[in-house]
């Protein structure tokens, strides 16, 4: 019933503003009934397109987020200096180099993740338990990373141990940001969850080039890390 009401309200909004020539993005609002995970693509507010992949009963985006706006159109500040340490929404490209956007996506701080508006509408930053569901389905943390990592050494540093990408998740090693310093691109991938560990630390997931583990860890909220979204 709630989804029907949302769809009805969206139609009313479009009708009411049509005379004012206001056009909503085609990807705005509830998911189409024709959406098929693993086949259909998803667009964020800016129009960036993401492939999808079904793993068990979950549907994931197959790429790291790269949007610079929240799903309500609010601009996320691009922060390249020490103000990254402030507890305000921020994103950056690894090494402050936009050429890293297409492959690795953006790095976000926790304040941005915690808006609950970072993923496209109908999607969300996965919780710690949703990441655990993924690793359990793949046989546990000790082997899940290998099944999720892009195979080969085109982006992962050698030896990229155990990487098969048999899930199609295609995890990339986007590195991270700590304060003003960047590190570990090609060596580690680090992804936010939406779950608090304690105080100013958040549960996260990491993968490395030297093992097959999907590592459960926690980092400070000022960390810059990648985001993968899962369908509501």
Image: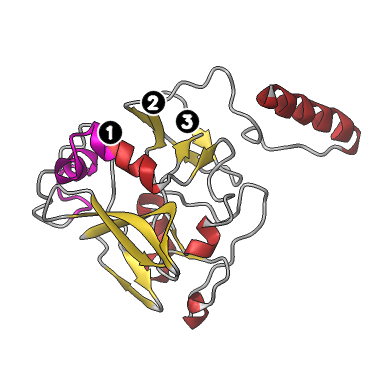
Dot 3: element: loop
Magenta span covers which residues? Answer: 135-156
| Dot label at residue 205 | none
Secondary structure at badge 2 equals loop
Toward which corner of the image does residue 16 lie, by quadrant?
Answer: top right
Asked if labels 2 and 1 touch by Cβ distance under 8 angstroms, the answer is yes
| C-alpha distance separating marks 1 and 2 | 9 Å
**Front-lying residue, 208 or 125:** 125
Mark closest to the chain's N terminus, 1 or 2: 2
Query: Does the rendering let one see residue 70?
Result: yes
What x and y, as percent, mark residue 33?
A: 58, 18
Which circle marks residue 168 in the picture? Answer: 1
The number of callouts visible is 3
Q: Quadrant of residue 106?
A: bottom left
Task: Report, in whole angstroms, how far the alpha carbon at label 3 lies from the one at label 2.
Answer: 8 Å
Q: Within 10 angstroms of label 3, few (less than 14), some, or many (20 or more) residues? A: some
Mark 1: secondary structure: loop
Q: Position of residue 84 (x, y in %)?
A: 49, 75
Which residue occupies the foreground of this view, 155 or 232? 232
**Residue at position x 72%, y 29% from top?**
6
- Quarter containing the N terminus: top right
Task: Rate crowding at label 1 as few (under 14), some (14 to 19) or many (20 or more) other CA atoms within 10 Å.
Answer: some
Can residue 221 be seen in this snapshot?
Answer: no
Q: Please say which color scheme the image uses.
A: secondary structure
Q: Residue at 25% of width from left, 32% of height from top?
A: 137
- Find residue 18 and report its image quarter: top right
Tag 3 residue: 41
* Residue 81 position within the rendered picture, expressed as x and y whole percent measured from the top left: 48, 80
> Which residue position holds label 2?
38
């Amino acid at each position: 019933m709630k989804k029907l009401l949302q769809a009805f309200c969206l139609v009313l909004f479009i009708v009411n503003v049509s005379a004012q020539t206001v056009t909503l993005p085609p990807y705005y609002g509830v998911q189409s009934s024709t959406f098929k995970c693993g086949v259909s693509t998803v667009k964020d507010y800016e129009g960036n397109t993401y492939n999808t992949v079904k793993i068990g009963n979950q549907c994931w985006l197959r790429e790291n987020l790269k949007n610079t706006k929240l799903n309500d159109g609010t601009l996320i500040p691009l922060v390249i200096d020490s103000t990254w340490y402030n507890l305000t929404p921020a994103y950056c490209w690894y090494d402050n180099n936009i050429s890293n956007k297409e492959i690795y996506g953006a790095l976000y701080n926790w304040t941005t993740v915690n808006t609950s508006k970072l993923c496209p509408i109908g999607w969300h930053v996965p919780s710690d338990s949703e990441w655990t569901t993924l690793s359990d389905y793949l046989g546990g943390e000790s082997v899940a990373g290998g099944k999720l990592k892009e195979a080969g050494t085109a982006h992962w540093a050698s030896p990229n141990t155990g990487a098969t990408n048999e899930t199609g998740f295609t995890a990339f090693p986007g590195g991270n940001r700590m304060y003003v310093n960047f590190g570990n691109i090609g060596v580690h991938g680090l992804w936010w969850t939406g779950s608090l560990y304690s105080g100013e630390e958040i549960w996260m997931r990491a993968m490395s080039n030297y093992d097959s583990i999907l590592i459960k860890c926690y980092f400070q909220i000022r960390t810059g890390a990648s985001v993968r979204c899962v369908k509501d």
